[in-house]
Image (cartoon, rainbow, N blue to C red):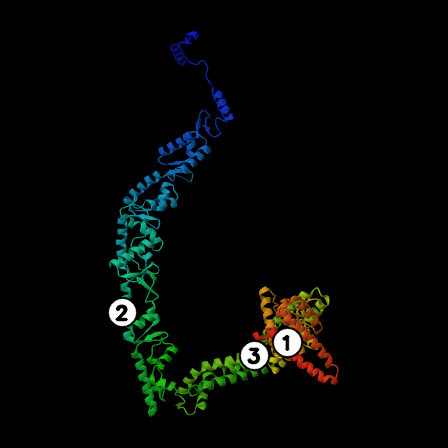
Amino acid sequence: MEAALGLDLSSLLTQLAATQQALSAAKLSERNVVELINKLRQLGILSEGELLHTLNGKEYLTVECLRSEIQNALRQAGGRLSLVELPTIVGVDYVHCERQASVIVSESGGTVMEVQGELITTQYFDAIAAEINDQLHEAGQLNIGELAAQYGLATEMVLNMVSMRLGSTITGRLEGGLLYTQSYLRAIKAQLRGALRAAASPALVLNLMRDAGLGATGDAASAGGGGGGAGLAAALASSGGGGVIATLIEELVQEGALRGALKGGGTSWAPAVYGEVQQDAVASFYSQNGWVAYDTVRRKFTPILIRDVPEPSYAPSLGISNERSYLRGTFPDGLPLESAFVSPSLLAALEAAVEDVAAAASTGSGVGSGGGGWVDVAPLLPSVLSEADVAALLGRIPLLRDQERRPAKERKVHVEKADADARTAAHKALQERKASSGAAGTAGAGGGGSGAGAAALPDWFPEMDWGGVDDGKAEAVAQLLLPGAVAAYEEALQAAFTAGAEERRRAKESLARQFEESCTRLLLYGAGVETYADDEATYTALQRHALRTTGAECVDLLYRWARVEHPPEGAEQSAAAGGPASVSGNGPGFLTAAEVKQVLRSVPPDVAEGLAAAADAPGAATVRDAEVLLDRAAAAVGVRAKKLDKKGEKAALAALRERLLSSLASEVDPPAALTLMVPLANMRIMGKAVTLPGKALGQVLSRLQQAAEEGSELAALVRGLGELHEGVVEYLKAQSGGSAAATTTGAMLERLSAMLPQLKAGLGLQEQHQ
């Protein structure tokens, strides 16, 4: 077949080789290549984002090629490369570089990260960690903030990087943002030991470090192996002593290199020698004087003496804390007083002086200047003791304790006499002030002072030995009685002046409370009437009855409150004569028309306008209309009208039910009991309160019979109330028939009275009032 076609395999191969070696006569231009690429994209052979062109438009490259070139550039940059440099390096637009950099970060598994527009690898962090370790061993300490500035990284990132490589790449310790070596820490510890040993009194660690050269000069840094900067000690000193310094000081104390303790959360150092000197000083003062004041134990300021420091620093002294407990523990036989701690020897000297004067008084010979059986103990006691301390010491003397066991009436008769005279003088001054505009009252307050009291003492107690005129015993006793007498005088005078005001205040509080309770009941009745809105006649009767009873009561209480707050002319004198009842004005019934007019004339115009509006409340169409008028009047008068909420309404209903049950418990008259039972039944069935006129009882009972569930206890109760209502109506009709029906009415009354216990029990009276 090959022969027939004239083809030979060897000749074909020769032609193929010649064709391959022949040069092409036609080449594709750049435009043809671009058109060819676009055609391939149109045909879907190449995707839109598969090929990227360079910035100069001369080359195409795939995204995989771009990604590989970015990774090569990152390795050549040492593991840290800014994204803005990539377009220049790879020749591709920044958007494509940024997109592929994000892909590299997401696929790296944490070995590559993007930080503030830079690509950084973990190898870069390992390299700078090695550099930091070299710097650390050269300088002894490094500041994390300075390292962050040196490498252009965030402080938090450098801190995390260093923390992760501590103990491996970096050998050192990190605390408080400072990186340091053990050798540097030993140098700081040695300088701290010297500074704290030199302190002779409590000192702030900040001041000690500054005075010892551990401040911002960087001496400690140079001692630790060179290097600039403030150093670890300087940084900690600027914050008043940190955890590192406190830890070093505690280690020195545990090692026995220092004697003392840190106070104030590690900010102050208290050397043990200071406490020992204080304790020795307290013990010496106590043994020499027989007492020591508490403020002597507490020192205000003490100098801190440091060797080789030209000027001493000052800091608040820690002193002996809990000085009372310390003194009781150190001197168990001492006596703790209010202002000082005294020894038994002082009490023994005082007891000896009292026994000497008692013995001298019994023989009648006298003792020194204190003849007549008394002695001045002030020279025997320290001046720091208060009067209460002196009294406490005297109370420990057996001789005086025996005197204290005498009857209280015998011991206090002189005080009661002085107070009684002071109160008499106060009442007399009040009467004189009323008569002459207060001039005499002011003069009576002086009353001669202790001189008059000293002159009166011999007359009050003639059985006592008061000595001669110049002895001074009466004057001394009068000085002791004077403060109490003056206080009694002022108290009696103040009570007399404010008696009327106090009565008015109590009357106003009582009237305001009654007004609030009445308003609450009126609002409850208004809410209860709404359940009968479909029965116009009953609805109108209940509204009118509530307004003419409880509404009128609210108006009357407002007028009474205004009369107490703005008393008419001459009312103060009549109130003073009539006592508390006259002030409160809580008489029986409502105020008369004349009294109402008198109140309106005595109050200011705005108050009178509000009260006049409140007078229309009993005649209002509904409770809501009356509520508006009462609120306006209460605001004008100055009384708070409380609004009802869900919780308040529930509590008010419970209180009203308790009030009705209390009244029903003692009620034996059937007609009166019926007017209490029907509202109670309405509260149990309807859950609302109403106040009922007699003519509306039948309509309300009919509604309750419809609302009660057939066959229930409440239905039986309503039937019983209906029978009682019918019986009461017949009884009242028979009673109005005259004397001829007396026997019939008596039998009817007995039958009605017999029905009451069962109905009361049905209303829960036995549960509430057993």
Identify the residue position indicated by label 2 in the image: 280
Foreground mark, 2 or 3, reads: 3
The answer to which image quadrant residue 339 occupies is bottom left
Residue 467 position in % (x across, y down):
39, 90
**Relative to residue 158, is residue 733 drawn left or right?**
right
- Judge from the rendering whether residue 17 lies leftward or rightward of residue 420; answer left or right: left
The answer to which of 380 and 620 lies nearer the viewer is 620
CA distance separating discs 2 and 1: 74 Å
Q: Is residue 253 above or below residue 609?
A: above
Res 707 visible: yes
Instruction: Say few, some or many: other residues with alpha carbon within 10 Å of mark 2 (under 14 / 14 to 19 / 20 or more).
Output: few
| Secondary element at image label 3 | helix
- Per the rendering, the mark at residue 567 is 1
The answer to whether 400 appears left or right of 94 in the picture is left
Q: Quadrant of residue 411?
A: bottom left
Three-letter amino acid code at disc 3? Ala
- The quarter of the image holding the N terminus is top left
- Cα separation, mark 2 vs mark 3, equals 61 Å
**Which SS class for mark 2?**
helix
Per the image, the residue denoted by label 3 is: 499
Near mark 3 (Cα within 10 A), the count class, few <14, some 14-19 or many ≥20, is: few
Tag 3 or tag 2, which sits nearer the N-term? 2
**Disc 1 residue crowd, few under 14, some 14–19, many 20+, Cα 10 Å:** some
Task: Report how many numbered discs are placed on residues in the image.
Answer: 3
Q: Looking at this view, is 742 or 613 the one in front?
A: 742
Decide: is 380 above or below 206. below
* Residue 743 vertical placement versus 208 (above, below): below
Tell me the CA gap for discs 1 and 3.
16 Å
Q: Position of residue 628 (x, y in %)?
A: 67, 65
Q: Quadrant of the C terminus?
A: bottom right
Q: Mark 3 or mark 1, which is nearer the start of the sequence?
A: 3
Residue 595, horizontal then vertical, whole percent: 68, 77
